[in-house]
Every structure is written in C-alpha cells, then in structure tokens.
Image (spheres, grey):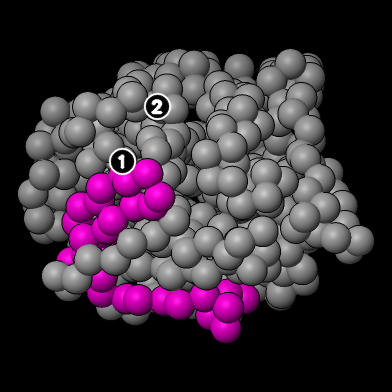
Amino acid sequence: MAALRVLISGAGIAGPSIAFWLSKLGHSCTIFERHQKLRTYGQQIDIRGHGITVVDRMGLKGEIMKHNVDEEGFQLVNVKGERKLLLGRMEAGDDKSKAFTSEIEIMRSDLNEILYNATKERSVYRFGTTVVDYENQPDGVLVTLSDGTAEKFDLVIAADGSNSRIRKMMLKRGERIKDNSRTLGFFVAYFRLPKTPEDGNLATGCMVPKRRFMMTRWHTEEQGQGYLMTRASGGVLKTALSKDVRAQKEAFAQVYDGAGWQANRLIAAMHEAEDFYAEEIVQRRTNIWHSGRVVLLGDAAFAPGLVTGMGTSLAVVGAYVLAGEIGRHGGDVAAGLEGFEKTMRPFVQQAQIPSVAAWRLMWPNSALGVRMLHFMIKAAMRLKVPALMERFQSESKWTLPRYEELLGGNVRG
C-alpha cells in the first residue's frame, strides 16, 4: 500500500498507540502535542481485558509490568476508618474479574513515557504545536497549525482528549457528526498526596453523607494520590471549574469541610499540590467518529467516564482497531474509517453501559444511607452479584480482531 502522511493530535495514550501501529505499516506519523514536553504527571490508571491483550501484542506488556503499581487491593471504610469491605487485586490473566485493582496498574506518566520511547524512532513529535483549523479536501486534509504554518496530510487523527478541540471544530462546522455526550453528575479532584508509614499499600475509599466520597492510593513509598469525588454542590463546582485553580481548590475545600475521616488531610494536601486537576465526569458519545479524512480516537471519541474504569483500555484497543482496519483495506482511508466505526462501536457501547446507573444510586445523602450502602455492598459481594452482572454486560461479548497486517506471524494473545 502507498504510505500515508498522518497527523496525530495528542501525545497521551491513544496518540502514540496509533502511531505505533501505523508506523509499523510504513505510514509517516507526526504527533502534535500542545504541551512543551511529554507530560510527567497524571493519576494511576489501569489496563484491563482486551487492553492487556493489545499491549501484549505491541510487545510492551513486559516493560509496563516493570512499572506496575504495588497496590494490594481496595478497602472501603466508614467515617471512623473502620473497614467495611476488602477487595483483592485482580489475579493475572483474570480479565473477567471486577476487582478494583487490575492486573496492570500504572501511573499515566509512566505509560506515556513507555509509549513515547516505543514510537519516537519511527514517528515525529512536535511539542508546543496544535491544530487550529482544518479543511477536508478530496485528496487530503489541509491543516493550519498554531505556529502559523499550513500542511497537508492524508489523514488527521484527533487523540486530543475528552475536551478535544478538533471534535469541537467538527461540531461547529455542522458536519454529519452530532454530539450525544452526557454528564454523569460527578465532579472529581485529583492531586498528589504525601505518604506516611501508616498508609500501607491498599487503596482506601470512604463514603460520607451529602453524596461525598474520598479515596487515597499509593504508588511509591513516599507518594500517593488523593481523590475527592462528589455528586453534591454541582452548581458551585461547575462554576468553579470555569475559574482558576485556586478557586477550584477553594470550592472543593468548601464542599468537604467537616466531612470526617481524612478530609482535613486531603484538603491540606490539595491546597499544597502543584498537579491538582478537577473535572466534571462526562461520557463522550457521537453518532459518528469521522468526517471526511478526520477521525476521533480515544477520549476524544468515546471517553467512557471515570466510573467505568475502561478509558485506557478503550484508547489502546481503539488505536489497534483503527490501524488494523486501515491496513486491512490497503491504505484506503475512507474504507478504513468505515471499518473502524463498524468494528469498534459495539465494544464502546458495551464499555459505556456498565456501572453508570448503579453509581448514580450509590451516593447516599445521610449517615443512615451510608450504613445501608455498606450493608448492600457486602450482601451483593456474598451473593456474587458482580460475577452475575459480568455475564450480561462484559466486554467479553465483543471479540478482539486479529489483524495479520499488523501482527504478521507474531500473534500474541
């Protein structure tokens, strides 16, 4: 097939993943990233199910496992710190488990670096540069860049995150794409948290009245992550998200004032954190993912929302499928994009369904409601409800394709 000239917007997870596969097919990939350098921050993420198979097929699972976070599992405690539930780590290869801690738990910055190192020799990275406009033409896409230059590409892949600028351009143009995104009613703040000898290696969560949840996770002997998640005070937090970081921190501190458990510790760490980030959880849904020769990928196309735990897996699987369909259709961009839509959408639809309705119900407003929630969760675990639900809403309903064009005779998994 003739080599394609491909622009990829975003050097997170999906962008370098698609560059890995397309460059393997002989295509020329340039990755544009708005930050001045590779990002070295971010929270703990996991890779599950088909995502593990894909990174294994990339030959990167071994390197990823070297950076695996030593998290023993998850415990749910009450406001006094008393344990109410303990979930162990997922066993290796048990991709059907709904354990909180996956077989692969890694810091986002570590995965970013692994993917960068795996692609930097075969792809070009241009940091500090973004796409500001594009024009679909019969034989390619004319792109205007933030440095004032214009270049033409055979294919443009928007892997620029849930708040994708390119997706917004597509919507603004009134093209066939329609935005069906939905907010899930959650606001989350993430930040680094100094570790103490008493913290151990368990992720720990605490639900408190007024629909508030706190969690700590630990990725080194010195550092961990704090999470504040709430369904309360939506108006206050939504307004704060349009303001500066200081205003956002003050809003979360106000919401969690007097919450109990480790709220004071988390609020203090949040105020000191330089990597603080807050967002409203949104599930990205559009009727199509491409228009002409411009296609959305990863969170830009189908961010599932924090509650599903599938964001990273969808990104790496989506990159594999997109590259595979382009390869299967001999570099025919139009046919490859149609194949991507047809093949990937059922998996995305399955990944976006689980847990959302249940999560919306699991946010009690009173202390009695919290105690009832603890009881219901323990009862559900005894009755093996998660395993039963797995049979009806699992990603296992979807079969990961084998693309010999990408894998040749070296098919893993």
State whether residue 333 appears in this view: yes
Q: CA distance from mark 1 to mark 2?
A: 10 Å
SS class, disc 2: loop
Outermost residue, front direction? Answer: 138
Point out residue 69 in the picture as x, y percentages from the top left corner.
63, 66
- Residue 74, given in percent of the width and then of the height, sits at 62, 47
User: Residue 128 falls in which quadrant of the image?
Assistant: bottom left
Task: Kindly tell me whether residue 367 is visible in this rendering.
Answer: no
Which residue lies most toward the bottom here? Answer: 121
**Relative horizontal placement of residue 168, taking residue 387 as reference (left or right):** left
Which residue matches tag 2?
286
Mark 1 or mark 2, earlier in chain: 1
Circle 2 residues within 10 Å: few <14, some 14–19, many ≥20: some
Is 337 located above or below residue 245 in the figure? above
Quadrant location of the N terminus in the rendered image: bottom right
- Element marked by disc 1: helix
> Residue flagged by tag 2: what amino acid is it?
Thr
Label at residue 167: 1
Percent of width and height locating residue 95: 79, 42
On whether residue 220 falls in the magenta region, the answer is no
Residue located 76% across and 24% down the image: 397
123 falls in the magenta region? yes
| Residue span colored magenta | 118-146
Above/below status of 291 relative to 317: above
Image quadrant in which you'd find residue 366: top left
> Are the residues at dot 1 and dot 2 in contact (C-beta closer than 8 Å)?
yes
Which residue is depicted at the point 79% across and 19% down?
Answer: 391
Task: Give the residue drawn at x 62%, y 34%.
Answer: 339
